[in-house]
Image (cartoon, rainbow, N blue to C red):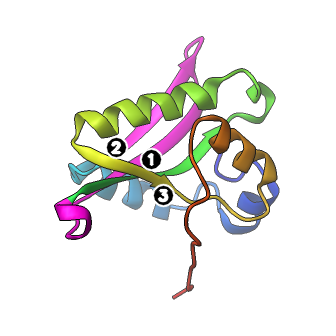
Amino acid sequence: MLADDPLGAGRERPGDPGYVAAFEEVERDPRQVLAVAVLDGEVVGTLQLTCTPGLSRVGMVRGTIEAVRVRGDLRGRRIGEALVGWALEEARRRGCGVVQLTTDASRVDAHRFYERLGFSASHVGMKLAL
């Protein structure tokens, strides 16, 4: 699912052993959650939630949602909404005071999706490839 769109197709390498190592590392970290949506016994969606302690905002823990994906043929069926809703509840349960995410500037449909769920474009995100 990570490679199932134009952006992912250019940066992901399905089958690469690096994914297994990354999965194992994330699984060992108690501040990380990998979640999947299952429909009729098949994985149809996924996301990652990271809970990061910080000093700002009086030591508030931040939840970060990443890699939200829904199988292409099932988009529009509220699977992504259910996944994100679950992640918000899990972030609350883990003591997060805010949940943040980034989405590529070209993903206009994703922007509308997150705004519909109550997120606001309050910050400017930046990246530097290393």
Few, some or many C-alpha atoms within 10 Å of disc 3 (few <14, some 14-19, many ≥20)? few
**Type of residue at label 2?**
Val
Tell me which secondary structure the magenta stretch mostly adopts: strand
- Asked whether, in this view, residue 69 is left or right of residue 46, the answer is right
Nearer the observer, disc 3 or disc 2? Answer: 2
Q: CA distance from mark 3 to mark 1?
A: 14 Å
Percent coordinates x, y for residue 79 in the rendering: 62, 25
Residue sitting at 76 percent across and 62 percent down?
A: 7
Amino acid type, mark 3: Tyr
CA separation, marks 3 and 2? 15 Å
Residue 48 got which mark?
1
Q: What residue would you read off at disc 3?
A: 19
Query: In the image, is 105 to the left or to the right of 61?
Result: right
Which residue appears farthest toward the top when viewing the image?
A: 40
Q: Secondary structure at mark 3?
A: helix
The residue shown at (34%, 43%) is 33
Where is 84 relative to 130, above or below? Answer: above
Is the residue 121 above or below the residue 116 in the image? below
Q: Determine which of the numbered discs, if any, sits on residue 108 in the image.
A: none
Q: Is residue 126 above or below residue 111?
A: below
Q: Position of residue 25 (x, y in %)?
A: 30, 58
Q: Earlier in the sequence, mark 1 or mark 2?
A: 2
Indicate whether residue 36 is drawn in magenta. Answer: yes
Per the image, label 2 sits on a secondary structure element best described as strand
Residue topped by disc 2: 33
Residue at left 20%, top 70%? 55
Q: Earlier in the sequence, mark 3 or mark 1?
A: 3
Residue 117 left/right relative to 52: right
Residue at 65 percent across and 43 percent down: it is 115
